[in-house]
Amino acid sequence: MTTPSLASTATLIHRIQQGELGARDLLVERCLPLLKRWAHGRLPAYGRDLSETDDMVQVTLMRAMGRIDSFHPERQGAFLAYLRQILLNTIRNELRTQKRRPTTEPLEGELPPSSGSGSRDLVADLDAYEKALGKLGEAQRQAVILRLEFGMTFPEIAEEVDLPSADAARMSVSRALVEIAGALP
């Protein structure tokens, strides 16, 4: 799968900001598969009955498009990072909302004992991962996100992060993962 280049994404954003409606559709079409791939499986099973992955992606795109006039890409991959952050915040908000909602399904039989900390553990794990990512340099952080969260290949990462080769992207991701592992509890 190919990813949008900075120039074409930046050009589409500029065209949207100039009022060209068709450019909005092209940008959504370009980013939707990546965002869906990243979002898949991020919402825990207990939250999926009320908020499917596609709904979370749609909310993310609506929020991003609602603020597109004030978005100015400052680096390569900035729009994907922007979308990722909006989706991550949307998932966190949904987890918090789910935690506050009472159970609406009738319970049958006996339930195994639960500590009730599943969503807290997930949020804590996500926060620890984000903190570890924050300790990386910008290029390494982008490479890790593109590989682990967007599922891009090393040649795609090399192109997106402006590395000289797929091997350079592979080494960048490998070194970053070692750093992340060392920073996690």
Image (tube, helix red, strand yellow):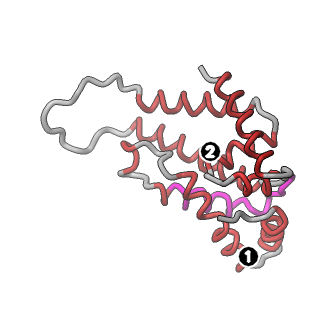
Most foreground residue, 64 or 39 = 39
Q: Is residue 66 located in the magenta-colored stretch of the structure?
A: yes
Q: Amino acid at mark 1?
A: Ala
Q: Residue at x 64, y 64 (%)?
A: 1
Q: Quadrant of residue 104?
A: top left
Q: Residue at x 78, y 76 (%)?
A: 19
Distance from disc 2 to disc 1, alpha carbons, whole Å, reads: 28 Å
Mark 2 / mark 1, whichever is N-terminal = 1
Q: Quadrant of residue 76?
A: bottom right
Q: Nearer the viewer, mark 2 or mark 1?
A: 2
View extreme (top): residue: 185
Find residue 71 and report its horizontal and vertical position in percent: 79, 57
**Residue contact at pointers 2 and 1, CB within 8 angstroms:** no
Q: Which residue is mark 2?
A: 148
The rendered magenta stretch, by its main secondary structure, is classed as helix
| Neighbourhood count class around disc 1 (C-alpha, 10 Å): few under 14, some 14–19, many 20 upward | some
The secondary element bearing badge 1 is classed as helix
Q: Is residue 133 above or below residue 159?
A: above
Find residue 108 and report its horizontal and vertical position in percent: 14, 38
Q: What's the mark number on residue 23?
A: 1
| Neighbourhood count class around disc 2 (C-alpha, 10 Å): few under 14, some 14–19, many 20 upward | few
Q: Amino acid at mark 2?
A: Leu
Q: Is residue 35 left or right of residue 115?
A: right
Q: Residue at x 72, y 40 (%)?
A: 173
Find residue 32 and report its horizontal and vertical position in percent: 60, 64
Where does the C terminus fall, quadrant-wise? top right
Q: Is residue 31 located in the magenta-colored stretch of the structure?
A: no
| Magenta residues (range) | 56-75
The secondary element bearing badge 2 is classed as helix
